Image (cartoon, helix red, strand yellow):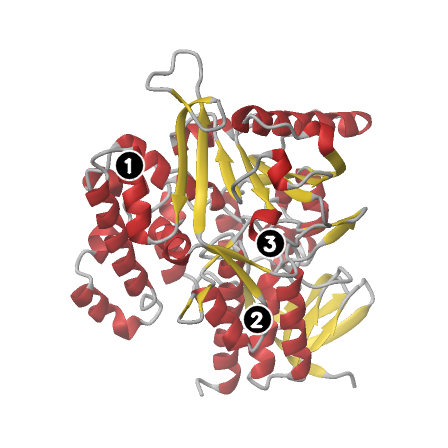
Amino acid sequence: MSKKYDVIIIGAGNGGLGAAATCAKAGLSTLLLEKHNIPGGSASSFVRGRFEFEPSLHELAGIGNPEDPGSIDETFKRFGADVDWISHNSTFRLVVPAKDGDKDTFINENGVEVTVDARMPAGFEDFANKLEELVPGSYDSCMAAFDLGTRMYSAFDKLEKPLEIPSILKEVPDFMRITGHTLNEVLDALGMPKKAQDIFSTYWCYMGVPGSIFDFLYYSIVIHSYVKAGTGIPKLRSHEMSLAIDKVIRDNGGEIWYNSEVTKVIMKNGKPAGVVVNGEKEIYGSHFICNSHPNITWSELFDEMQVPKKQLKMLNARKIACSLTTVYLGMNKTKEELGIKDYSVFIAPDSDSDKQFDACQHLFNGFCIINCLNEINPNGSPEGTSQLFLTTMSFGDELKDVKPEEYKKFKTKVAKNMIETCEKALNISITPYIEEIEIALPPTFCRYLNTPYGTPYGYMLEKWDSLIPRTIQFEQDQPFDNFIFCGASQERGDGYGCAYYSGEKAAKLTIKAIKGGK
């Protein structure tokens, strides 16, 4: 008789890796199944010519420092995984080029006429001082937002422990008053000037929802993580994180099978009992954690009649989040020769996050994030070179009318548009110095991540389906008592830290179920 595992984990993305490491360390017999030949999902790398590229990671918040470790560093310490972090004492630069008819424009350091050019430092006080310099009269409201965010951050950690909810209301009496209000509503209530709000809201795109939808509680957690201690990345690309957790799983007796795609979930007595791997091998377990997108899971791994009605209602109610397009560039010039001075620059057609969101309903949108790896890791590319990656977002099936024979020409057009957006906004020259280029449109991410439209974000965090209701309903929203989802489709949405958290949470619930609360 074949071995029956305590827990089988479907997918070795960040969430699945976190779940497997937590289960294996708890002594459960753990099997992690992954269809690709490497771990990590988006947390991997690929090589073109003499350049090694990072598929998706822009920057990590929550690395912290040895004196004050951040949430990411603490997570990896809990896993027992060793990663060599590189930190960067900055947050972002927001550049909004001027359009015809714009008022209050000026010429920035790059010689470009703009309405906004904000290079924001790390540290709450420094960030607020810079915002005051850019928008006089914004310091007090900015510090008030950070103070409120810090208290929200503290209270949120207790939200999943029902017995501690009374203490939340006592220690942070305005928690319930803030919960359910959008980012725009709270910043308005704090009296933050509109231009300052636009700068403060720059990170909206990391979760794919604008200020009129993004609830303040969650955004305050996001910006708190970035501003408190700056950003960072692993020295050896995000694959360093994946391999470190792979080692933890194996060192604690867990098994990982690569090139092993789960093609079917075996049901017995109305709930999962096993899985079919690569269409032929049956593996059995008592509990399951799924790092696959729910839409794909239900449509490909289950028969239609096996899908719980509540899950169908959830799928129909939720909106698929945005998709990404990324252009990876290996440059034969250094960043200094190119005139690049920042790690992360957000280039937007308008300063307002809602107008940015509206523009991103289509691919040719004037919105682009340009990252320069060498700004944070000088040795990130061969000597005398630099590495850039440009990212924009879109919603839905933007390529539905593109014929297969036109695809290559179309994606080249998209890449050219994104490159020209960056060249014009920063007054730099990129095109003549490109040595290597790779273009990933939504179909590329769809093929690799196996998600609807290639989204890495799961579902949109809408007002009715935001952080608080998802967190409170998490266990009730799981389909079976032995089957739990994890990853970007769950309560915290996209983000490496969010994915590791969701995997760890799913594992803890599984451990509790197996060990009877011990």
The percent coordinates of residue 224 (x first, y second) are 36, 54
Looking at the image, tell me whether mark 2 or mark 3 is earlier in sequence order. 2
- Residue at the top extreme of this rendering: 101
Instruction: Give the spatial CA distance, label 2 vs label 3.
Output: 30 Å
- Judge by depth and name the residue closer to the eye, 479 or 304: 479
Q: Residues within 10 Å of mark 2 (few under 14, many from 20)?
A: many
Binning the other alpha carbons within 10 Å of mark 3 as few (below 14), some (14 to 19) or many (20 upward) gives some
435 sits to left or right of 269? right
Q: Amino acid at mark 3?
A: Asn
Q: Which mark is residue 507?
A: none
* Kind of residue sitting beneath label 1: Glu
Any part of residue 267 in sight: no
Question: Quick one: label 1 or label 3, which is nearer the N terminus?
Answer: 1
Residue at the image point whose x is 57% and y is 29% from the top = 422
Which is more foreground, mark 1 or mark 2?
Answer: 1
To which residue does mark 2 refer? 19
Say whether disc 1 or disc 2 marks the residue closer to the N-terminus: 2
Amino acid marked by disc 2: Ala
Q: Which residue is mark 3?
A: 377
Q: Is residue 79 above or below residue 306?
A: below
Q: Is residue 85 left or right of residue 472?
A: right
Q: Position of residue 402 (x, y in %)?
A: 72, 26
Q: Do tag 1 and tag 3 residues touch (Cβ < 8 Å)?
A: no
Q: Is residue 22 above or below residue 98?
A: below
Label drawn at residue 133: 1
Going 66% across and 57% down the picture, which residue do you hit?
Answer: 41
> Residue at position x 66%, y 49% from top?
55
The quarter of the displayed image where residue 99 is located: top left
Query: In this orientation, does residue 336 appear?
Result: yes
